[in-house]
Image (spheres, rainbow, N blue to C red):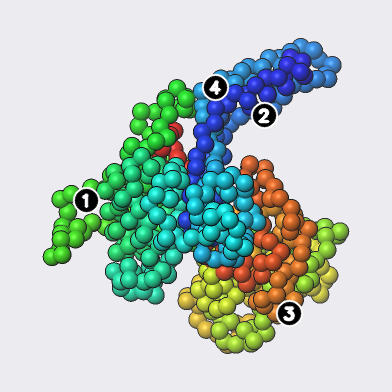
């Protein structure tokens, strides 16, 4: 096959592939976690369908490339023949399988900082054109165009939501009314922070059936499913015949060394508007979709009613794994997954205090490293004992909250960089002996949660905390939470002047103003704008979700919607 013929067939595949556009609304958008999750889910489904259609259940064979120059003409003909067959199979796939693409209609969040980060990463012209009369975003000067007027979620009208007519809704409502600090979960509906979520429940109840979203994805803290808000939520979905799945999932189940157990809900409409003919879906479609078996109708009939005639739903059946997507139960995760070490997620511009690459030309960003140091005031206090300390060799880390860097206990892990990995190879004899001492000392806290350690006034003996204990950077936390962070972009996150938790804006980095690129997996990479401080990064991520976990949840919804196994 000539080079021209090869390029022509490749172009035909790209041009002929039918595209299914999935429109979506992202409520409580934050920094765009659900957007990245949807992108990853669509990319996984597209790749999976293509591989199954072309090679059955095997991966695409990328070795069958056309050899234009070779001394063995017979081998050339064989290779070209395999390539032609592969391309024809791909062409058949492209004509029969819809390619899922996303179009965001609007994103809503009350925080100007969230909107700044969101628009820095995801702003597009299509979103602006599709706004029906309101868009939650960064405040701008008023113009004659009413579309620029920001509107809070609880003020969105039935007409506005029906005008959007989105295929997918995603949301991560405020978790504070449902956290462990609130003992009476039934009082959560009286919390002002629940107002917007309850408004969305009301909208689901009253919207025209054909205007309802086909898929609804929701994330919150574990315990939400026991709240009064959850009852109202489930009743709203059940009254509109949604098939629902409830999940408790944590990042270790998808190969990330971070503990962040969260509740997820997937709802797929019984009469969805996105159904496609079976001959336009993947050849591997089965009569009974394995993902759809995770979803069920929750009938409100024949259940207990209290004295106020209020229908009481039984507790939801919460699932802790997703077998069709190879997401194991959290109890057996160590048997199924070889989690990567923390070192994989560290920045490379911090020398031995980051992801050490033995690159003599790689300069250490001293100002950034200084901003991540634990303040002496904390190191010298007994509260330092409450830190969850990990090393770069560990394969776990604690949940990062919005109070990271503000409080010590229960807000996220800090990193001890003394005596980790093979860095001793580049050190002198005196430094090597110090590393050995540090290794012995780290055994007193390594992999042991603070509540399981007995306080020892000499627990810091042999540990150089001033030099080797630091916070995780914003980009490092983002990686642990499944965000696709380009390594070059991490250099844009520079250190703040003064203290590590100051409010000075970060200095401008090399990637501060460029358009967000795509990574190797086809998912957009994430970065913070240069004006976002380190403290703001921590808070934003603490209020966000794990992208990789959310992507698997979104994949359940999309595979159920399109009946893709």
Q: Earlier in the sequence, mark 3 or mark 2?
A: 2
- List the residue tagged with mark 2: 62
- In front here: 325 or 312? 312
Q: Residues within 10 Å of mark 4 (few under 14, many from 20)?
A: some
Residue at image x 81%, y 15%?
Answer: 72
Quick check: 426 above or below 98?
A: below
Q: How far apart in space, not on screen, are marks 3 and 4 (Cα)?
A: 59 Å
Specify the label residue 229 is tagged with.
Answer: none
Residue at image x 62%, y 60%?
Answer: 117
Residue 261 shows in the view:
no
Secondary structure found at label 3: loop
Q: How far apart in space, not on screen, are marks 4 and 2 (Cα)?
A: 21 Å
- List the residue tagged with mark 3: 498
Where does the image place residue 504, in percent across and percent down from the top left? 70, 75
Where does the image place residue 365, in percent across and percent down from the top left? 79, 67
Q: Earlier in the sequence, mark 2 or mark 1?
A: 2
Q: Earlier in the sequence, mark 3 or mark 4?
A: 4
Q: Residues within 10 Å of mark 1 (few under 14, many from 20)?
A: some
Q: How far apart in space, not on screen, are marks 1 and 3 (Cα)?
A: 58 Å
Q: Earlier in the sequence, mark 4 or mark 2?
A: 2
Secondary structure found at label 2: loop
In this rendering, position of residue 95 left or right of residue 473: left
- In front here: 508 or 346? 508
Quick check: 240 above or below 32?
A: above
Q: Earlier in the sequence, mark 4 or mark 1?
A: 4
Q: How far apart in space, not on screen, are marks 3 and 2 (Cα)?
A: 51 Å
- List the residue tagged with mark 4: 95
- List the residue tagged with mark 1: 300
Q: Residue furthest front?
A: 144
């Amino acid at each position: 096959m000539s080079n021209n013929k090869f390029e022509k067939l490749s172009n035909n595949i790209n041009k002929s592939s039918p595209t299914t556009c999935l429109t979506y609304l992202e409520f409580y958008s934050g920094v765009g976690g659900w957007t990245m999750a949807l992108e990853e889910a669509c990319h996984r489904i597209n790749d999976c369908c293509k591989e199954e259609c072309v090679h059955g259940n095997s991966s695409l064979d990328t070795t069958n490339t056309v050899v234009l120059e070779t001394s063995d003409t017979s081998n050339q003909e064989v290779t070209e023949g395999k390539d032609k067959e592969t391309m024809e199979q791909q062409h058949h796939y492209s004509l029969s399988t819809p390619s899922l693409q996303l179009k965001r209609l609007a994103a809503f969040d009350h925080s100007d900082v969230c909107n700044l980060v969101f628009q820095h990463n995801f702003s597009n012209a299509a979103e602006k054109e599709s706004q029906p009369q309101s868009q939650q975003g960064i405040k701008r000067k008023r113009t004659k165009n009413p579309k620029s007027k920001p509107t809070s979620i609880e003020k969105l009208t039935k007409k506005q939501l029906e005008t959007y007519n989105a295929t997918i809704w995603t949301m991560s409502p405020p978790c504070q009314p449902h956290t462990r600090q609130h003992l009476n979960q039934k009082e959560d509906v009286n919390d002002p922070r629940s107002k917007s979520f309850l408004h969305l429940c009301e909208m689901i109840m009253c919207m025209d059936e054909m205007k309802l979203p086909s898929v609804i994805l929701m994330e919150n803290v574990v315990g939400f499913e026991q709240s009064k808000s959850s009852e109202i939520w489930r009743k709203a979905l059940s009254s509109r015949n949604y098939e629902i799945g409830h999940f408790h999932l944590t990042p270790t189940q998808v190969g990330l060394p971070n503990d962040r157990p969260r509740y997820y809900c997937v709802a797929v409409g019984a009469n969805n508007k996105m159904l496609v003919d079976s001959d336009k879906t993947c050849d591997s479609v089965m009569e009974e979709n394995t993902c759809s078996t995770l979803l069920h109708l929750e009938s409100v009939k024949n259940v207990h009613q209290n004295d106020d005639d209020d229908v009481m739903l039984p507790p939801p059946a919460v699932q802790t794994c997703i077998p069709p997507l190879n997401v194991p139960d959290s109890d057996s995760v160590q048997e199924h997954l070889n989690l990567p070490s923390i070192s994989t997620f560290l920045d490379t511009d911090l020398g031995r205090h980051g992801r050490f690459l033995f690159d003599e030309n790689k300069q250490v960003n001293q100002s950034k490293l200084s901003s991540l140091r634990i303040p002496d005031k904390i190191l010298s206090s007994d509260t330092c004992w409450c830190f969850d300390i990990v090393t770069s060799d560990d394969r776990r880390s604690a949940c990062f909250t919005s109070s990271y860097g503000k409080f010590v206990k229960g807000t996220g892990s800090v990193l001890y960089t003394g005596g980790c990995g093979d860095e001793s190879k580049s050190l002198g004899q005196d430094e090597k002996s110090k590393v050995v001492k540090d290794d012995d000392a780290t055994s007193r806290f390594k992999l042991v949660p603070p509540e399981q350690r007995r306080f020892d006034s000499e627990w810091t003996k042999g540990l150089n905390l001033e030099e080797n204990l630091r916070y995780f950077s914003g980009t490092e936390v983002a990686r642990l939470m499944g965000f696709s962070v380009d390594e070059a972009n991490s250099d844009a996150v520079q250190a703040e002047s003064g203290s590590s938790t100051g409010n000075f804006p970060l200095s401008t980095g090399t990637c501060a103003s460029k358009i967000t690129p795509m990574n190797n997996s086809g998912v957009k990479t994430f970065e913070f704008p240069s004006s976002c401080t380190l403290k703001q990064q921590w808070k934003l991520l603490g209020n966000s979700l794990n992208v990789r976990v959310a992507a698997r949840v979104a994949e359940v919804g999309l595979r159920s919607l399109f009946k893709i196994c």
